[in-house]
Image (cartoon, rainbow, N blue to C red):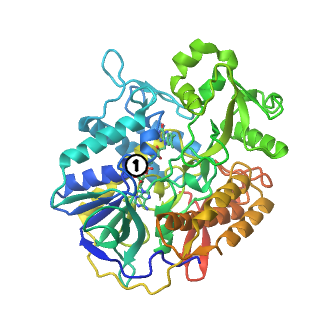
Amino acid sequence: MIGHRLLAPPPGWRKDSDVVVVGSGVAGVTAVLAIRRAMPSARILLATKSVLDDGSTRWAQGGIAAALGPGDSPDQHLSDTLVAGAGICDEAAVRALVTDGPGAVRRLIALGAEFDREPSGPLALTREGGHLRRRIAHAGGDATGAEISRALLAALAQAGASAELEVIEHALALDLLLTGDGRAAGITLHVLGEGQADGVGAVHAPAVVLATGGFGQVYSATTNPSVSTGDGVALALRAGADIADLEFVQFHPTVLWLGPDARGRQPLISEAVRGEGAVLLNDAGQRFMAGQHPLADLAPRDVVAKAIMREMLASRTDHVYLDGRSLGEQTWQHRFPTIRASCRGIGIDPVTELIPVVPAAHYASGGVRTDLHGRTSVPGLYACGETACTGVHGANRLASNSLLEGLVFAERIAADLAGEWPAAGEPALDDRPASVLDPSIVRPLQQLMSARAGVLRSGSGLSQLAAGLAGLGEQECDKPDAAAWQATNLHLVATALARAAFLREETRGSHWREDFAEPDEAWRGHLVCSLGLAGLTEVFEPVADD
Ligand SMILES: Cc1cc2nc3c(=O)[nH]c(=O)nc-3n(C[C@H](O)[C@H](O)[C@H](O)COP(=O)(O)OP(=O)(O)OC[C@H]3O[C@@H](n4cnc5c(N)ncnc54)[C@H](O)[C@@H]3O)c2cc1C
């Protein structure tokens, strides 16, 4: 079924716009506001598949990184980002990020975002792993994303609905419309609403901005919300765009295990809980980190995540435990009230009980490949935020660079559009048959992905995964609806990711192969994937040294 579009019959309704922005997280809303600022007369349609603030942005905790403090500089931020990216960042993209970053954060503040401040007035900047300077601005302590989302959506509301700006919630983007010569011509949408734009329709527009977030939902355990199904990557693939670095997925070692049938976002159990003395226990109640690393339970994230997965595989369980009973009521109440509340939400009080935890997919460094202006390989199609692969993260994201990337590259897209708007063209009819997969494949797909392309990867496991995914790809259904469309997208993204993870025979950044445990200079580059009539193909592009 690979290569087929989601929608066979012609759309039922039509709208016209100058640009369609898909997604209402930090990237999408920033793009809308920046395009409006640059070209007030442009007609913008913002489509989002759930409600406006449903996405990863509102859950971001730690903060946003930018060289704003004394003693810091974009060059220092650049250097820290390149180290985290393990040799394959696009240096020009990182330079754009760190140079534009401070101004982008200041514009966010001017828009109304309230960051935490020192008693004397300046921004309270903190440090996170990999940052050699204090440069993480945060809001409400650990509620940075919620404040950024609030401020951006307030500015959007202030811009108001008008002839130039239309916002449609519960509008699932299906596929890109293309002109006969392969340029973007708009998008098909499935709208669950009342009135004229209901059901499946088309928005004709010469520019489309994908800001659809990540794809954590290809895994059974993820910190990402349920909207993070990789739709942008899948529809870009079907439109012929290049995708890069899919194999680089960042995992968090401990999220709250919500039960075998849990769906959607799983709350983070911060490393700080282990920092205060909590320890990991296996199914038999034994500690297993001691002896694995000199820092035991406080070993680096990848070491802890791998050790947990090995325990789970050995005991055939789907979680381990975190024992934080030694922390006591006071520490739980004052240091970790949010985490305690999440635990209590599933009937567990960490003051007296063990917390079930599991490693979870957290951040996708790869995605739709773009240049420094957010342009993809399809003329008129842009991408920004987590769905894009701008090259700033390389093989591993430096903490708190992702919100910044969304801001900076959304603004760059607006600047590019202001320079030259893509020419309008009529969409060509696509007569390839539509086919979608049965939503019942999602659970087994997620379980396969976590077991074989998660924290522990090997050639044999990835081969088994490919066979399993191929089998699931046979399970078509004849009821195209939102669940089937998203299942089809998850399957395409999972297949492309599994292939890239299989091909990359080395360990680099967040891609860990048990059978190739070291980085290999021959693999210092990018796997660029595209989808043609013959299916998925990959090309390896080495990093060009200056
Ligand atoms: C728990 C957690 C903590 C994090 N902490 C930090 C942090 O401290 N600092 C940091 O920099 N980053 C952090 N991140 C990462 C960061 O939050 C995300 O990378 C960033 O918010 C992504 O923004 P975005 O706009 O690209 O996507 P999102 O905010 O995920 O928004 C995607 C949007 O696209 C919509 N959408 C998706 N598919 C479709 C479709 N087919 N049709 C229409 N609409 C669609 C969604 O509904 C949503 O509106 C964290 C992430 C998580 C999950």
- Residue at image x 19%, y 48%? 159
In the picture, the quarter occupied by the N terminus is bottom right
Q: What x and y, as percent, mark residue 156? A: 25, 47
88 w.r.t. 125: above or below: below
Q: How many marks?
A: 1
Q: Is residue 204 visible?
A: yes
Is residue 413 or residue 114 the one in the foreground?
114
Is residue 515 or residue 155 the one in the foreground?
155
Q: Is residue 390 visible?
A: no
Left or right of 301 on screen, residue 407: left
535 w.r.t. 298: above or below: below
Q: Quadrant of residue 345?
A: top right
Residue occupied by mark 1: 406
> Does the closest atom of ligand 1 sit within 8 Å of the Cβ of label 1?
yes
Left or right of 450 on screen, residue 24: left
Q: Quadrant of residue 98?
A: top left
Q: What x and y, as percent, mark residue 486? A: 51, 63
Q: What x and y, as percent, mark residue 502? A: 71, 63
- Residue at image x 24%, y 43%? 155
5 w.r.t. 518: above or below: below
Residue type of the residue flagged with mark 1: Gly
Is residue 425 or residue 543 the one in the foreground?
425
